[in-house]
Amino acid sequence: MQVDNRERRLNDWLSRHQGLVIKVARSFARETHDRDDLLQEIAFQLWQSIPGYRSQVAETTWIYRVAFYTAINWSRKEEHRKQRNCQLGEQALGLLSKQVDEDPRVAWLYERIAELDPVDRSLTLLLLDGFSYREMSETLGISESSVGVRIHRIKKSLTNQLTRENQHVL
Amino acid sequence: MCFEEIQSIWNSQKPVEKAVDETALLNWIRSRDQAFARVVGATEIVMVLTLLFVAAMFFRDPLVEGHDRILMVAGLMSLLAAAFVWSGRVARRKRVVNYDDSLLGIVEKSLDAVNYQQRRMQSFVWWFAAPMSVGLLIAWWIVDPAKRYLFYTIFIPGFVLSMALAYWQIGRENRRNLAPEKARLEGLRDRLRQG
């Protein structure tokens, strides 16, 4: 695939699905610096994945797969990446131009999501973004019944935590 | 309290528009893509060139001088080892993660790739050692006995040292990168398979 086409595709994906990528980065990295780092890594993996992209797969499904796989791998490889970025003579770029959301409730929710197991974290993002059980099953490769069991557990956990938080505030 | 409140908090997020510096990101991706290709490619090319040089040394006497044709056996083995390293380079380039599959499928393919890489690395020492050993043995056998001391003082110790270094480096790479990567992928695969 020509480099120009690849860059056009990447720019197109980042323009239309930037929110999706940022949500994944926020869920897997708590600090702003780390989010920039993860965002760079996801964007790079999207770039690497473009030659293999087939239009039979929905773009959001493809981007979610890349983002989840990259994010789940990310924390262990963070040390190696910092060494490599030093070799390139660059630090994280400060890509996020502003804090994405100031609402404390949203920040609280992202913190709760970040505490989940990486697989449950991925499921939660898909659930909150309106994916069906079948779509979640196809994206992650687990059975729909397994999706249902995990979703039930996640909903119960998040709801209980929100209840405790509201009682604490009151 | 029900999950709908969680959902409404999520839905209350402002739409994200142009929050990312795309120009800076694309420039970074280009430079990283090139740097990655340079580092990995250079290592494999050095290995292949070394093996080709060793093969040329083994072929020199039989083809140019017309004697000690048995050294061609070692030369041929060196060429085969160079082909093995080159085929690994081609195979590695093809093993870029393909996201056609689900996350579990990607993890399983990545695990296969890591296992394959481990096997290749562990067998590399023997692929490299075998032609060199055969060559040394043949050379020791046919050389003027008065010059055999060179084998005991230079060639054999040099060979043993380079093989020991290669073995140590491969073991280190496996311990630091491949084995932890494999453990992590296996853990992720098991979590995905659990209910």
Image (cartoon, coloured by chain):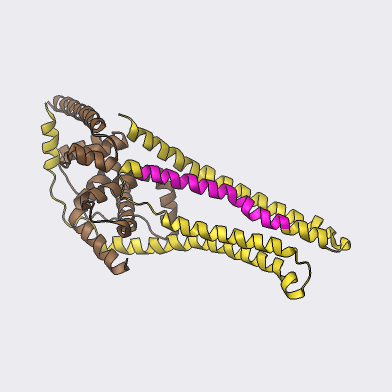
Q: Residue at x 31, y 43 (%)?
A: B103
Q: Which residues are magenta?
A: B106-134
Was residue A47 drawn as part of the magenta stretch in this picture? no
Left or right, B175 with respect to A124, comes to right
Q: Which chain is brown?
A: A
A141 in relation to A59, above or below:
above
Where in the figure is residue B110, as x and y percent of width and height? 41, 46
**Quarter residue B31 falls in:** bottom left
Left or right, A125 with respect to B72, comes to left
Left or right, B82 with respect to B185, comes to right
**Quarter residue B112 falls in:** top left
Looking at the rendered image, the quarter that the N terminus of chain A falls into is bottom left
Q: Colour of chain B?
A: yellow
Can residue B78 be seen here? The reply is: yes
Looking at the rendered image, the quarter that the C terminus of chain A falls into is top left
Can residue A75 be seen here? The reply is: no
Residue extending farthest to the bottom is B64
Q: Residue at x 17, y 42 (%)?
A: A129
A61 in relation to A104, above or below:
below
